[in-house]
Amino acid sequence: MRDALIEQLAALVGDAQVIVEAAAMQPWLTDWRGRYRGAARCVVRPGTRAEVAAVVAACATAGAPIVPQGGNTSLCGAATPDASGAAVVLSLGRLNRILAVDPLNDTITVEAGCTLAAVQAAASAAGRLFPLALAAEGTCQIGGNLSTNAGGVQVLRYGNTRELTLGLEVVLADGTVWNGLRGLRKDNTGYDLKQLFIGAEGTLGVITAAVLKLFALPPVQTTCWLNVATPAAAVELLHRAKDAFDAQLTAFELVSDTAFGLVLRHIPGSRQPGAVSPWYVLAEFSGAAPAAVEAWLAACLAEGTVADGTVAHSQAQARQLWALRENISEAQKIEGLSIKHDIALPLSRIADFLAQADAALAAAFPGIRVVAFGHVGDGNLHYNLSQPESGDNAAFITRQPAVHRLVHDIVHALDGSISAEHGLGQLKREEILRYKSAPEMALMRALKQALDPRGLMNPGKLL
């Protein structure tokens, strides 16, 4: 039997867009990694901003918690409801329209349910570039990218989602709509309100649309897979590449041989480019003459900075090299359970972290396997841990609090962050209290109280 709120929601958005059957709701109640499972009163799929506002207002009146959800690709459980069954899951996938493309202003205005790939395609069709790039771009949605301040592979050149956003439209906790869809690069008229909602994981309001920055399409790109001896050598190579190419260096990814080995094992069609190495770098140069890149690489090879290298000479070859990096997470998922870390460090401390953490973990957990990779160009490492035999990982996962404490304490001591681009969600909600100062936490709670005094927006996440 459906309750009064569900009947009201059905009247607002249409009966077919309110899902109540337990089996039918399951895709919205489990996170991508299969780690978090929840329950919900119902799943609601509004199709317009007005419907989102009406749904939020109805839930506020009824005192029902709301869990906004985009493509459900969160790695920290940020979009999964708790087990109480009290929450309404607000799925934004039907808000998927490209509202405007302004090539002269270099902006695109989109609804929150657009997939990242759809926004990239719309920009490309207008002869422009939207540079946010993630492995999940065919599934993840712009609202989720904004809510987690997503990073990806081109932060080195273009910045996080926060830097790519000029304006937002947000439904507040009482159903009020704030329209801040302005494509201005200078607007010094008070608080920059959009920044409150970017990275807030849906705890302050529901993002329904955004104005995003566009850029010129690079006339040429050169992608290369390089062998390096150590993380320190990779950071030194990054420094040299930035000196030589500045903003033309658009991506610089670090991959350990252990991480790469999982791709070779589990992803069909994956092949080793060149010789085996303990560490690899995947670098992308945009706008630089290919001959200049190859001359620079030849000098690096001659000096021994790079031990071996493969340069893509077609888009197909470039896609094959990128697939080796982008399939690491999928390969890990196939391999089985692991304890994951998404951390940020000053570039100068990356090698220190890897040396200290590897040694400390090997001493505390003999036989542990470290899968390290990430966006070393901006200091973001994915540092994931498991046992070599997948059958041993169920027991290993029970040691997660001790593993997190060891890794995160080293990160903190090196002036890093325990979350670089995935947010806090449920996974790090308690952990962050160890590393954020009391004034920081007080400010965050004050914002939450001001914008969501009843605590109905995505409860149990972030704070």
Image (tube, grey):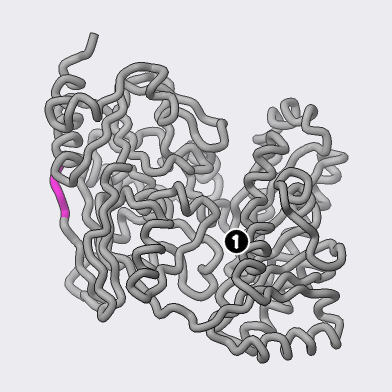
Q: Which residues are magenta?
A: 174-178
- Magenta segment includes 175: yes
User: Which residue shows up at 20% across the image and 21% down it?
Assistant: 6
Quadrant of the drawing holding the C terminus: top left
38 left or right, relative to 398 = left
Q: Is residue 153 placed above or below 64 in the rendered structure?
A: below
Could you tell me residue 351's position as x and y percent?
75, 66
- Magenta segment includes 450: no
Quadrant of the drawing holding the N terminus: top left
Residue 16 or residue 362, whichever sits in front: 16
Could you tell me residue 396's position as x and y percent?
74, 31
Magenta: main secondary structure: loop
Query: Would residue 229 be visible to someone looking at this image?
Result: yes
User: Which residue shows up at 67% across the image and 40% down it?
Assistant: 339
Residue behind mark 1: 380
347 left or right, relative to 142 = right
Could you tell me residue 268's position as x and y percent?
72, 47
Residue 68 or residue 46, whichever sits in front: 46
User: Which residue shows up at 39% across the image and 70% down it?
Assistant: 124
Residue 284 or residue 159, whichever sits in front: 284
Element carrying mark 1: strand
Amino acid type assigned to the residue bearing label 1 in the image? Asn
Residue 299 or residue 289, whichever sits in front: 289
Query: Would residue 247 be visible to someone looking at this image?
Result: no
Q: Quadrant of residue 352?
A: bottom right
